[in-house]
């Protein structure tokens, strides 16, 4: 799961493997301060942060449009104002949602797992995953034209 996230973000196998190792080193480093209630979410969040930090530090020209988007996201993260805006937007979207709903959304829309894979990952039935997503979509302040 961690390697898959690193591959998706870095788009380079050797860099992804290195980043995956760094994720586990980071977890060991912060061992005493970790909340183990959502281990999959913790792993994915840590993997994302490690990869975005690598992208930030490389400061290279993007090789394809997806890399350009990731580089822009990584550079936005360095601004305290942008971080604050992103957190507020995510809080508005996921405010009253359980952590598992956030994980479901990331696995489905970011990692592009199938509904079956998401259900297996979070320990729910496919219909349960669909129900969570349906409820989330109903509460989102997005019009049909935006989606």
Image: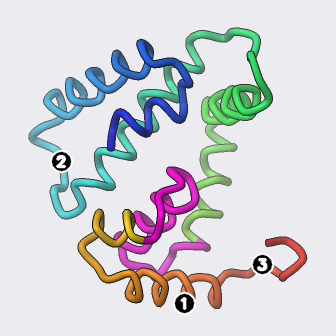
Q: For residue 20, what is the image quadrant?
A: top left
Answer above or below: position of 77 versus 45.
Answer: above
Please, which residue is most extreme toward the left here? 32
Q: Which residue is mark 2?
A: 34
Please tell me whether mark 3 sits on a helix, a strand or a loop.
Answer: loop
**Foreground pick, 29 / 122:** 122
Q: Which residue is mark 1?
A: 135
Quadrant occupied by the C terminus: bottom right
- Marks 3 and 1, how far apart in space? 13 Å
Please give the label number shown on residue 142: 3
Answer above or below: position of 103 versus 128.
Answer: above
**Sequence-wise, which precedes: disc 1 or disc 2?**
2
- Mark 2 nearby-residue class (10 Å; few <14, some 14–19, many ≥20): few
Colour mode? rainbow
Q: Which residues are magenta?
A: 92-115
**Sequence-wise, which precedes: disc 3 or disc 2?**
2
Q: Given contact means CB atoms under 8 Å apart, are the residues at marks 1 and 2 in contact?
A: no
């Amino acid at each position: 799961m961690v390697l898959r996230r690193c591959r998706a973000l870095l788009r380079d196998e050797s860099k992804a493997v290195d980043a995956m190792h760094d994720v586990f080193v980071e977890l060991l480093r912060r061992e005493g301060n970790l909340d183990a209630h959502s281990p999959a979410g913790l792993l994915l969040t840590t993997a994302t942060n490690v990869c975005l930090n690598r992208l930030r530090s490389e400061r290279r020209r993007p090789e394809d449009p997806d890399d350009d988007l990731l580089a822009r996201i990584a550079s936005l993260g360095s601004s305290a104002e942008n971080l604050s805006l992103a957190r507020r937007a995510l809080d508005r979207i996921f405010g009253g949602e359980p952590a598992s709903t956030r994980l479901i959304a990331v696995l489905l829309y970011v990692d592009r797992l199938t509904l079956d894979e998401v259900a297996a990952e979070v320990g729910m039935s496919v219909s349960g995953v669909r129900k969570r997503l349906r409820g989330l979509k109903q509460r989102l302040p997005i019009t049909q034209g935006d989606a």
